[in-house]
Amino acid sequence: MSAPALSPSSPDAPDEKASGARRWDFMLDIFAMNSFSWAVAIPIELVLAGMSWSEHLKVRLMALVFNTLIARPFSMYRNWIVNRFGGGGFINAYLVDTFVFLSFQFPLYMANMRLGGASWDEIATASITFMLIAGALGRPYGIYLDWVRRVWINTLVPLWSKRAA
Protein backbone atom coordinates (compact mmCIF):
# COMPACT_ATOMS: atom_id res chain seq x y z
CA MET A 1 0.00 0.00 0.00
CA SER A 2 1.29 3.43 -0.85
CA ALA A 3 1.72 6.20 1.68
CA PRO A 4 -0.91 8.90 1.37
CA ALA A 5 0.16 12.34 0.23
CA LEU A 6 0.28 14.95 2.95
CA SER A 7 -2.42 17.58 2.61
CA PRO A 8 -3.40 20.37 4.99
CA SER A 9 -7.06 19.48 4.53
CA SER A 10 -6.55 15.74 4.96
CA PRO A 11 -8.53 14.00 7.69
CA ASP A 12 -5.30 13.75 9.70
CA ALA A 13 -4.95 17.51 9.90
CA PRO A 14 -5.59 18.59 13.49
CA ASP A 15 -8.75 20.52 14.25
CA GLU A 16 -9.69 20.80 10.59
CA LYS A 17 -13.11 22.36 11.10
CA ALA A 18 -11.84 25.07 13.44
CA SER A 19 -8.88 25.94 11.29
CA GLY A 20 -10.51 26.05 7.88
CA ALA A 21 -7.39 24.30 6.57
CA ARG A 22 -9.08 23.40 3.30
CA ARG A 23 -9.23 27.01 2.14
CA TRP A 24 -5.52 27.38 2.92
CA ASP A 25 -4.54 24.50 0.60
CA PHE A 26 -4.48 27.00 -2.25
CA MET A 27 -2.28 29.46 -0.39
CA LEU A 28 0.22 26.80 0.65
CA ASP A 29 0.43 25.36 -2.84
CA ILE A 30 0.81 28.81 -4.40
CA PHE A 31 3.55 29.81 -1.96
CA ALA A 32 5.45 26.54 -2.39
CA MET A 33 5.27 26.56 -6.19
CA ASN A 34 6.26 30.20 -6.63
CA SER A 35 9.09 30.25 -4.10
CA PHE A 36 10.60 27.01 -5.41
CA SER A 37 10.18 28.05 -9.04
CA TRP A 38 11.95 31.37 -8.59
CA ALA A 39 14.88 29.83 -6.73
CA VAL A 40 15.37 27.22 -9.45
CA ALA A 41 14.84 29.59 -12.39
CA ILE A 42 17.57 32.09 -11.48
CA PRO A 43 20.57 29.89 -12.36
CA ILE A 44 18.83 28.22 -15.31
CA GLU A 45 17.62 31.36 -17.03
CA LEU A 46 20.32 33.87 -16.14
CA VAL A 47 23.43 31.71 -16.09
CA LEU A 48 22.81 28.73 -18.38
CA ALA A 49 20.39 30.22 -20.92
CA GLY A 50 22.04 33.64 -20.88
CA MET A 51 18.81 35.60 -20.59
CA SER A 52 18.99 39.26 -19.63
CA TRP A 53 17.62 40.44 -16.28
CA SER A 54 14.78 42.09 -18.17
CA GLU A 55 13.83 38.85 -19.94
CA HIS A 56 14.22 36.88 -16.72
CA LEU A 57 11.96 39.25 -14.76
CA LYS A 58 9.36 39.23 -17.53
CA VAL A 59 9.37 35.42 -17.64
CA ARG A 60 9.26 35.18 -13.82
CA LEU A 61 6.35 37.63 -13.55
CA MET A 62 4.45 35.57 -16.10
CA ALA A 63 5.46 32.45 -14.19
CA LEU A 64 4.03 34.02 -11.04
CA VAL A 65 0.65 34.24 -12.75
CA PHE A 66 0.87 30.74 -14.28
CA ASN A 67 2.25 29.14 -11.13
CA THR A 68 -0.52 30.73 -9.10
CA LEU A 69 -3.11 29.28 -11.47
CA ILE A 70 -1.59 25.80 -11.66
CA ALA A 71 -0.24 25.35 -8.12
CA ARG A 72 -3.36 23.68 -6.74
CA PRO A 73 -4.04 21.48 -9.81
CA PHE A 74 -0.38 20.38 -9.71
CA SER A 75 -0.64 19.49 -6.02
CA MET A 76 -3.87 17.60 -6.59
CA TYR A 77 -2.25 15.72 -9.50
CA ARG A 78 0.80 14.97 -7.33
CA ASN A 79 -1.40 13.77 -4.46
CA TRP A 80 -3.33 11.51 -6.84
CA ILE A 81 -0.13 9.97 -8.29
CA VAL A 82 1.58 9.64 -4.88
CA ASN A 83 -1.50 8.01 -3.33
CA ARG A 84 -1.48 5.41 -6.10
CA PHE A 85 2.19 4.80 -6.79
CA GLY A 86 4.15 6.27 -3.87
CA GLY A 87 5.27 4.71 -0.64
CA GLY A 88 7.91 2.32 -1.95
CA GLY A 89 10.95 3.94 -0.41
CA PHE A 90 13.41 6.58 -1.58
CA ILE A 91 13.81 5.32 -5.17
CA ASN A 92 10.06 5.05 -5.66
CA ALA A 93 9.49 8.54 -4.20
CA TYR A 94 12.23 9.92 -6.46
CA LEU A 95 10.72 8.30 -9.58
CA VAL A 96 7.16 9.32 -8.74
CA ASP A 97 8.04 12.95 -7.97
CA THR A 98 10.26 13.16 -11.06
CA PHE A 99 7.46 11.80 -13.26
CA VAL A 100 4.90 14.18 -11.75
CA PHE A 101 7.21 17.17 -12.10
CA LEU A 102 8.21 16.46 -15.71
CA SER A 103 4.78 15.44 -16.99
CA PHE A 104 3.07 18.49 -15.52
CA GLN A 105 5.67 21.26 -15.50
CA PHE A 106 7.74 20.84 -18.65
CA PRO A 107 5.06 21.77 -21.21
CA LEU A 108 4.05 24.76 -19.09
CA TYR A 109 7.66 25.91 -18.71
CA MET A 110 8.19 25.90 -22.49
CA ALA A 111 4.98 27.85 -23.10
CA ASN A 112 5.86 30.38 -20.41
CA MET A 113 9.32 30.96 -21.89
CA ARG A 114 7.81 31.58 -25.33
CA LEU A 115 5.12 33.92 -24.04
CA GLY A 116 7.79 35.76 -22.04
CA GLY A 117 9.63 36.64 -25.22
CA ALA A 118 12.58 34.26 -24.97
CA SER A 119 14.16 33.36 -28.29
CA TRP A 120 13.91 29.82 -29.64
CA ASP A 121 17.61 29.31 -28.87
CA GLU A 122 17.07 30.43 -25.27
CA ILE A 123 13.99 28.23 -24.99
CA ALA A 124 15.86 25.22 -26.36
CA THR A 125 18.81 25.74 -24.01
CA ALA A 126 16.59 26.34 -20.98
CA SER A 127 14.28 23.42 -21.87
CA ILE A 128 17.10 20.94 -22.39
CA THR A 129 18.63 22.08 -19.13
CA PHE A 130 15.24 21.82 -17.42
CA MET A 131 14.79 18.25 -18.68
CA LEU A 132 18.31 17.25 -17.68
CA ILE A 133 17.93 18.53 -14.16
CA ALA A 134 14.27 17.56 -13.70
CA GLY A 135 15.45 14.45 -11.91
CA ALA A 136 17.14 16.76 -9.48
CA LEU A 137 14.05 18.99 -9.15
CA GLY A 138 11.06 16.67 -8.86
CA ARG A 139 11.95 15.05 -5.56
CA PRO A 140 13.25 18.22 -3.89
CA TYR A 141 10.02 20.00 -4.82
CA GLY A 142 8.00 17.11 -3.39
CA ILE A 143 10.04 17.28 -0.19
CA TYR A 144 9.70 21.08 -0.07
CA LEU A 145 5.93 20.94 -0.66
CA ASP A 146 5.51 18.31 2.05
CA TRP A 147 7.69 20.39 4.41
CA VAL A 148 5.58 23.52 3.81
CA ARG A 149 2.46 21.48 4.51
CA ARG A 150 3.96 19.91 7.65
CA VAL A 151 4.92 23.34 9.00
CA TRP A 152 1.38 24.50 8.39
CA ILE A 153 -0.31 21.42 9.86
CA ASN A 154 1.96 21.02 12.89
CA THR A 155 2.69 24.64 13.75
CA LEU A 156 0.39 27.19 12.21
CA VAL A 157 -2.95 25.33 12.29
CA PRO A 158 -2.77 24.77 16.09
CA LEU A 159 -1.80 28.43 16.60
CA TRP A 160 -4.64 29.60 14.37
CA SER A 161 -7.06 27.29 16.21
CA LYS A 162 -6.05 28.80 19.57
CA ARG A 163 -6.63 32.32 18.22
CA ALA A 164 -10.06 31.36 16.89
CA ALA A 165 -11.10 29.84 20.24
Image (tube, helix red, strand yellow):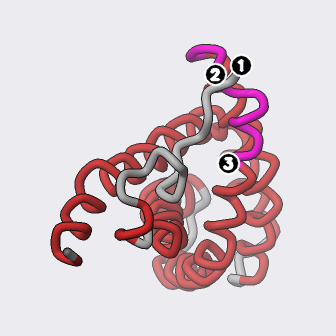
Q: Can the viewer see residue 84 in this picture?
A: yes
Amino acid at pointer 2: Gly
Q: Is the residue 134 above or below the residue 33 in the image? A: above
Along the horizontal axis of the image, is 19 left or right of 11? left
**1 or 3: tag closer to the N-terminus:** 1
Query: Is 126 displayed left or right of 139 in the figure?
Result: right
143 or 64: nearer the viewer: 143
Residue linked to disc 3 = 130
Quick one: label 2, few (<14), some, or many (20+) residues within 10 Å? Answer: some
Foreground residue among 14 and 46: 14
Q: Does any portion of residue 31 appear in the rendered image?
A: no
Q: Mark 1 touching mark 2, by CB under 8 A? A: yes
Which residue was labeled with disc 2?
A: 87
Q: Residues within 10 Å of mark 1 (few under 14, many from 20)?
A: few
Magenta span contains residue 94: no
> In this view of the protein, which residue sits in the foreground, 140 or 84?
84
Dominant secondary structure, magenta: helix
Does the magenta-highlighted stretch encompass residue 85?
yes
Give the percent coordinates (x, y) of residue 43.
47, 54
156 with respect to 38 (left or right): left
Which numbered disc flags the more N-terminal residue, 1 or 2?
1
